[in-house]
Amino acid sequence: LRHWATGQTLNLPVTTTPVQVSAEAVQATLDGFAKPAVSTPLVIRGEGATATLSPEAVAAALSFEPGEGGTLVPKVDHNKIVEAAGPQLKSSEKEGKDAQIVFEGGRPTVQPSVDGKGVDWNPTLQPLFDLLKAPGAHELVAKYHTTPAKVTTEQANQLGITEVIGEFTTGGFAADSGVNIRTVAQKVNGAIVKPGETFSLNGFTG
């Protein structure tokens, strides 16, 4: 760098970087993992829905890094598998819902809670690495986990809510404010405040 502008021909110093992965190791990983991994679609069978990932989608989740002893180590990005398979299994999942107090005929009644159910991706994808390097069809069975409601139907019934104890109406606001008020009211409607608890509008709506 000191002599770059002198107009003279410069001799550049050169260092040699040893090869980390041998050609033989690359070929072994290609034959033993890469080719089998993308030889067939990956199928994940859920409860009432099936996700099918093309070989291209599987390839997008694969990467290879130098390992010990000149080897080439394959890695599978589970997040990319979930991104591709998740939407296809969405119909087999169920969103949880807390029990709510709703007003029918002017009286409060309990709207039952619903436990949530979703694909448990960690145990579902645990066999994936060994599966991809095996010949033949690549199929997994989706495992699910249940998320209990925070407020169950039984808990809501035990609160003993039997009557309206207060209500009010607001008005005289601008149209855009009315949109905000209705949005918040829909979120807050049915919120349960247990004895001794304090209700926070900001905390409840986020």
Image: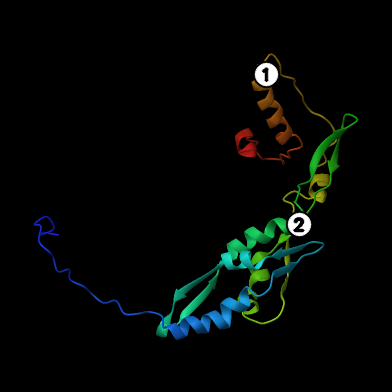
Which element type, helix, strand or loop, lies under badge 2?
loop
Q: Position of residue 164 (x, y in %)?
A: 82, 29
**Residue sitting at 77 percent across and 26 percent down?**
166
Which element type, helix, strand or loop, lies under badge 1?
helix
Q: Position of residue 111 (x, y in %)?
A: 84, 43
Which label was assigned to residue 100?
none
Q: Looking at the rendering, in which quadrant would you find the N terminus? A: bottom left
Instruction: Give the amino acid type for the residue marked by disc 2 in the picture.
Output: Glu
Q: Is residue 87 left or right of residue 67?
A: right
Circles 1 and 2 in contact, beta carbons < 8 Å: no
Whichever of labels 1 and 2 marks the residue nearer the N terminus, that label is: 2
Q: Is 55 or 130 nearer to us in this picture?
A: 55
From this view, report whether residue 192 is shown above or below residue 168.
below
Residue 147 in sight in this render: no
**Residue sitting at 59 percent across and 62 percent down?**
80
Q: Looking at the rendering, in which quadrant would you find the C terminus? A: top right
How far apart are labels 1 and 2 at the CA level? Answer: 38 Å
- The residue identified by callout 2 is 93
From this view, report whether residue 198 is shown above or below residue 77.
above
Instruction: Give the amino acid type for the residue marked by disc 1 in the picture.
Output: Ala
- The residue identified by callout 1 is 175
| Residue 162 lies in quadrant | top right
| Residue 21 lies in quadrant | bottom left
Residue at the right extreme of this rendering: 105
Q: How is the image coloured?
A: rainbow
**Residue sitting at 23 percent across and 74 percent down?**
15
**Residue sitting at 72 percent across and 65 percent down?**
52
| Residue 181 lies in quadrant | top right
Density class for disc 1 (Cα within 10 Å; few <14, some 14-19, many ≥20) is few
Q: Is residue 165 left or right of residue 60?
A: right
Q: How many marks?
A: 2
Q: Is residue 197 left or right of residue 114?
A: left
